[in-house]
Amino acid sequence: MIDSRDQMVGVGAMAHAPVLLVPGQAIREPTLIWSKILMTVLFLLISIGMTNLYSAAAGTSLFWSQLKNLALACVGFYVCGWIISPRFYNSYAYWIYGAVCAQLVLVDIIGGISMGAQRWLKVGPIVFQPSELAKIAVSIIVAKYFYTSRLSQPYTLRDLLPLSLIIGVAFLLIFAQPDLGTAGVCALIMTCQLCFIRINGRSLAIAATGGLTVVLGAWFFILRDYQKLRVLNLINPDMDSSNTGYNALQSFIAIGSGKFLGKGFMAGTQTQLQFLPARHTDFIFAVFSEEHGFLGTSVVFILFVTLIYMGLAIAKNGKDVFASLLAVGMTGIIFVSFAINTAMVLGLFPVVGVPLPFFSYGGTAMIVFCAAMGILVSIERESLDLFRKVSPFQRKSANSRSSKQRS
């Protein structure tokens, strides 16, 4: 729990362990324990995800296109992890958020349209989805808000109103595309960060009541018919089995037919015979389940849980409230996307366009997920002061000056 005085239980516990002195050995720099585990798990997930995409795309150009996207994502991972310090996001938080919102406005005006949705911007040969970038922007602005507005008592709804209005801008711009799934993910990322903030109990009760009222109002006055059908199909998948319920039913068949060990790589009938829709994007987890069964999916679940745990461990040892909440936000991006996508495929959540991290096809999404992991690495590096490198000559001269002063 982070209080309003820039403290969190465990924050900074390992933040300032600059060196380790061992008798008879040279000075050793601190090691990035959590980041090394995180990078190992990330490598495994990307390897499994790309192999699975090859099967889902049957080795077509989609796979090779995603390889190019992965190369850009690796560059983004390195830049966010080793080049850009978390202090940069803190200093330019509102500029970053404003730039992303400006892109979302452009999408609503001149964005490319595909399958009835207007979600993409094209700059020369580059096509990208600004709503994916909004996930990182939301995480940054929430962390910045609580870093600058610190109170000595739990936050109330009045204290959180400015933040709600700020995030509401991005939410409405994304919802207008229409992209309810990504808009909801942004709201849930903020919710993950709020879970680590002290909030007044009465305010929580009022917010819960208000949230229920908004949901009911949205059902009757805002949601479109096809969006309502997705929710109703969750209750009864056979209600519209040939139309809005088709995707979910085919997903159930694919997952169930995988049984314990699966049918084998590129041997899934639902996938290879193209019965499973959106098999390279929204329902790619069903492809993996059919081919690798319960055992394979259990391994993937364990890897994602480990990745999320590493993110929270980095957040616990963040240097300040901004770093800790930013780490929670980056972890929330992975957690929320993973939870919604797998729940959707398993019939526990309505069908929405939320990609599975490191598995689903999509350039912007892959870059955002890898960038989020890079930011987590940079937060741990910042907590160990690895962004403030001092050359051996500077250290030696400083030591000599201090010894002269003592003498």
Image: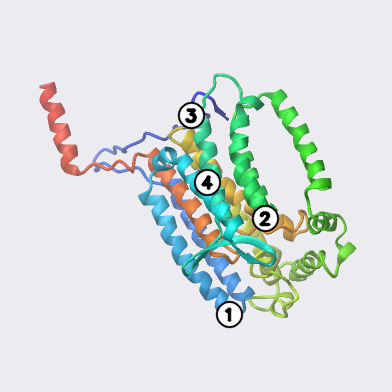
Q: Is mark 2 on a helix, strand or loop?
A: loop
Vertical placement of residue 20 versus 284, above or below:
above
Whole-angstrom CA distance, mark 1 to mark 4, is 33 Å
Image point 31% across, 43% down: which residue? 29
Residue 91 seen anywhere in this rendered image of the structure: yes
Q: What residue type is labelled 4?
A: Ala
Q: Mark 1 points at which residue?
A: 60
Labels in figure, total: 4
Residue 317 shows up from this direction: no
Q: Earlier in the sequence, mark 4 or mark 2?
A: 4
| CB under 8 Å between discs 1 and 3 | no
Residue 123 bears which disc, if any? none
Disc 4 target residue: 137
Q: Distance between the residues labelled 1 and 3?
A: 49 Å
Q: In x, y percent, where is residue 33?
A: 43, 46
Q: Front-most of 400 and 216?
A: 216
Residue found at x 61% / y 30% = 160
Query: Is there a contact, CB below 8 Å, between mark 3 and mark 4?
Result: no
Residue beneath label 2, please? 179
Secondary structure beneath disc 4?
A: helix
Q: Earlier in the sequence, mark 2 or mark 1?
A: 1
Label 3 and label 4: CA atoms lie apart by: 17 Å
Q: Distance between the residues labelled 3 and 2?
A: 31 Å
Residue drawn at point x = 48 percent, y = 27 percent: 6
Proximity of marks 1 and 4: CB atoms separated by less than 8 Å: no
Residue of label 3:
148
